[in-house]
Image (tube, helix red, strand yellow):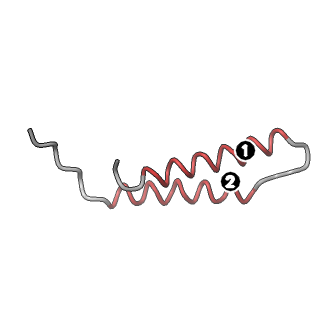
Amino acid sequence: MKPGVGHILVGVALLAAGIGITMASERTVWYGAMVVGVYYIGRGVYTMLKAAPTPPPEG
């Protein structure tokens, strides 16, 4: 797995949880989960862009 993919997956999960809970409840808004989710997605994309290209498999 390339570096940064884990951050993107965690970010998407947090963002989805924040949006899902906000939509399901009338008064609870999970801004924290949404902000952290967007941060982790950005961090993962940045890490993927800065990582060295993966060499082709030998064989």
**The quarter of the displayed image where residue 26 is located:** top right
Q: Between disc 1 and disc 2, whose residue precedes?
A: 1
Q: Give the labeled residue for mark 2.
A: 34
Identify the residue at image location x=68%, y=53%. 34
Number of labels in the image equals: 2
Q: Residue at x 34, y 47 (%)?
A: 1
CA gap, disc 1 to disc 2? 7 Å
Q: Is residue 28 left or right of residue 51?
A: right
Q: Residue at x 54, y 58 (%)?
A: 40
The amino acid type found where label 2 is placed reads Met
Residue 30 position, x and y percent, is: 77, 54
Left or right: 6, with 27 as reference point: left
Query: Residue 29 location in percent, x, y?
Result: 82, 52
> Quick one: SS at disc 1?
helix
Location of the C terminus (image quadrant): top left
The secondary element bearing badge 2 is classed as helix
- Disc 1 and disc 2 in contact, CB within 8 angstroms: yes
Reply above or below: 56 against 39.
above
Residue ID for mark 1: 19
The furthest residue to the right: 27
Q: Residues within 10 Å of mark 2 (few under 14, many from 20)?
A: many
Classify residue 30 as left or right of residue 52: right
> Which amino acid type is marked by label 1?
Ile
Percent across and percent down for residue 55 are 17, 49
Q: Within 10 Å of the Cα at label 1, are there few (<14), some (14-19), or many (20+) other Cα atoms? A: some
Disc number for residue 56: none
Q: Residue furthest left?
A: 59
